[in-house]
Image (cartoon, rainbow, N blue to C red):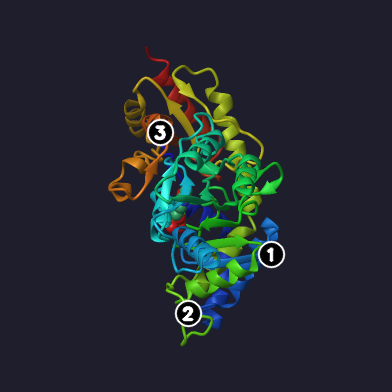
Amino acid sequence: MTRIPMLDLKAEYEYMKKDIDEAIGRCLDHQRWIFGPEVKGLEEAIASFLGVKHCVGCSSGTDSLVLSLRALAIKNTGEERFRPADEIITTPFTFTATGDAILRAGATPVFVDIDEETFNIDPVLIRQYLAEHKAGSTDGSRVVGILPVHLYGRACDMDEITSIADEHNLFVVEDVAQAFGGSWRGGKLGSLGTTGCFSFFPSKNLGGFGDGGMVATDDGELEALCRMLLKHGGRDKYNVDHVGYNARLDTLQAAVLLARMKHIDDFNARRRAIAGTYTEELRGTPGIVLPDAVDGHVFHQYTVRVGGGRREALQKHLAEEGIGSMVYYPHPLHRMGVFADGRSRMFGDLASADRAVAEVLSLPMEPLMDKDGIRKVASALKEFLNRP
Ligand SMILES: *Cc1c(COP(=O)(O)O)cnc(C)c1O
């Protein structure tokens, strides 16, 4: 039986082997493992790719969020961290790290429900929370920023989110971990907020051979603060100003990522083509809702909704056919212990996020998979879903 995995990193390595081996070979020659030339090279390449003034490499996507938020706290409040009364609006339907970064920066996440069709935070509800909160806040809390997540590679409505932020004087930190190369009305994701935060976890659209991340910004002060915070908090290594981290991007990761950058547009186009074939094959199948290939969607995941409580059975059927599938994510943030005990706020009942966690299923999305593979996945789905 030919197995179809979610992802085939070995195949991608074989495909780019020459570029990657040469990049690693150069590091072996120069031995500059910390802040080697490849780190600066990658920062410049991504800044120019996104059209932003500054990019700061760091140790993970999670750290790129923490560094951004800590830098904003220092710049905007003069304190090391936000206070619990400082609220940051985000989505409950994301990877834990999004909300966790807000807690680690000292603020309180406010979970606002998602749009059922896009799976992204609903700007109408952001507006509603701000209106009600302004009228009703008696506890001294205030909203300081918005942290939208471009889930599965699809952009949030950044026109709405940035205009809400402008009206209320809020920062916008974009979580672009799943959307490298994606865009909103022609603007690259990660270049539209106050900062954009990227992950180079191996399975992301631009993935390294380990952990890595990047902060993108046009704000020179935030850039300087992020650079200080990621190396213990000081401009000077032995005379430190802020409570910092050891959160550098390794030279070796930067070298691998630079080699993989060469293929990013091609690979994102392949993802869109695979999504197109899935949709062609699956259109009209009962009991399933397909994602919409809007402009700028880079399909980190091709995620369908399976109704009627049949998801687990479908997943089992796919597994029996040797086909991988994943549930991103099985638990919404507002139901996790880490966000309990007053550490977060919920706006409304977050019913759409609760429905999403029960229905979503992501199908194999390996940019190098061929049409036969895609068709095999689609027919296994159809075979199951067409059963009464
Ligand atoms: C992967 C991911 C992160 C965290 O990135 P790491 O590099 O794993 O720390 C944050 N947010 C989202 C939406 C992600 O998918």
Amino acid beneath label 1: Lys
**Can you tell which mark lies on residue 53?**
1
| Residue 60: x %, y % from top left | 46, 62
First along the sequence among labels 1 and 3: 1
Depth check, mark 1 against mark 2: the one in front is 2
Q: Is residue 42 visible?
A: no
Q: Assign a secondary structure to mark 1.
A: loop
Q: Nearer the viewer, residue 281 or 153?
A: 153
Q: Quadrant of the N terminus?
A: top left
Mark 3 lies on residue: 350
Location of mark 2 (residue): 241
Outermost residue, bottom side: 238
Residue 325: x and y in percent read 40, 37
- Above or below 58: residue 112: above
Q: Quadrant of residue 48?
A: bottom right
Q: Residue at x 56, y 27 (%)?
A: 279
| Quarter of the image that includes the C terminus | top left
Residue 162 coordinates in the image, percent (x, y): 63, 46
Label 1 close to label 3 by CB (< 8 Å) = no
Residue 37: where, in percent of width, then height? 60, 77
